[in-house]
Amino acid sequence: MIVECVPNFSEGRDTKVLDVISQAIEAYVPLLHRSSDTDHNRTVFTFAGEPWPLQDAAISAIAAAQERLDLRRHTGVHPRYGVADVVPFVPVSGITMAETAYLARNFGKRIWRELGIPVYLYEAAAQEFRGLEYLRKNIPLGLEPDYGSGQHPTAGVICLGARKFLIAWNINLHSKSLEAAKQIAKEIRQSNGGLPGVKALGIALESRGQVQVSINLVDFEASPLHVVYQAVESRCRERGIAIAGSELIGLIPQAAVDLSAGFDLRWENFSAESILENRLTARLTNPGTSASRS
């Protein structure tokens, strides 16, 4: 049984801290990829393995972050409620979504028991299905955690889920208009009547002098990459804005690449190593291979 874990940590600038988290993961399972963004001040780690060592890797990484990071001092344009902000489990092979959800729920209890960080469950891990956006909206309003209570003074809370593959993807614009990026994001996301399986935010990238449509694509079969890109491109054209390029955060399944074969997505950082199956094969057959980073 192989499960993927894709935790998002609220640190994207201090490479020493990120290296310690990487080492905590690699003590148990292969680290497939690490992707940091200084404006978001956030890093996405991708690792995979059998359920039990995977959980040990995840708890070790969270503990390393808890020891070294303080949410009260965090600055960044991405919304966050914890130093280990989002921790999703994804079934890869030999395990069902229901089994992965059970695994996630037990892991949530372990986080609270061993680290004292409250946990909120989302998507398939929740007793009643709810999206991550529901937690983003309701945690500040006093929503009670599924495990634990209140917030950890420095580590905040953890949003823990079981879900299908998610493609984290940013389309960067040759513009400084945050209002334009926010409006485009609003028009394309499913919750506002846009494309199915699309979640999006408009974000300013001060270090680049640009804005970004930051996308979580939760169903690439319903809305292939090129369909989403073309939707953003047409709305940019209406506003006289050019697309600077698109960047992948983490890894992407081969099937998603195949669905958009032949379309120019203006990739800034895509390569064969960006494909999940390629990285998984390389790391599981040759554990000494270094994880790719961006």
Image (cartoon, rainbow, N blue to C red):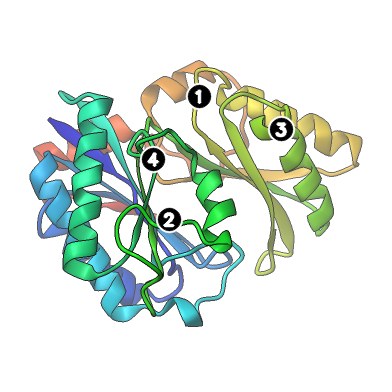
Q: Could you say whether the residue bearing mark 4 is in a helix, strand or loop? A: loop
What is the CA distance from the residue labelled 4 to the residue labelled 3? 22 Å
Mark 2 vs mark 4: give the one in front: 4
The image quadrant where one finds the N terminus is top left
Q: Residue 100's x, y, as percent?
A: 23, 34
Label 1 crowd bin: few (<14), some (14–19), many (20+), radius 10 Å: many
Amino acid type, label 2: Ser
What is the CA distance from the residue labelled 3 to the residue labelled 2? 26 Å
Instruction: Find disc 3 in the rendering and name its residue.
Output: 188
* Mark 3 vs 2, N-terminal side: 3
* Mark linked to residue 251: 4
Amino acid type, label 4: Leu
The image quarter containing residue 186 is top right
Residue at screen point 22% across, 24% down: 96
Residue at screen point 21% across, 36% down: 102
Instruction: Mark 1 and mark 3 in contact? Answer it, CB < 8 Å.
Output: no
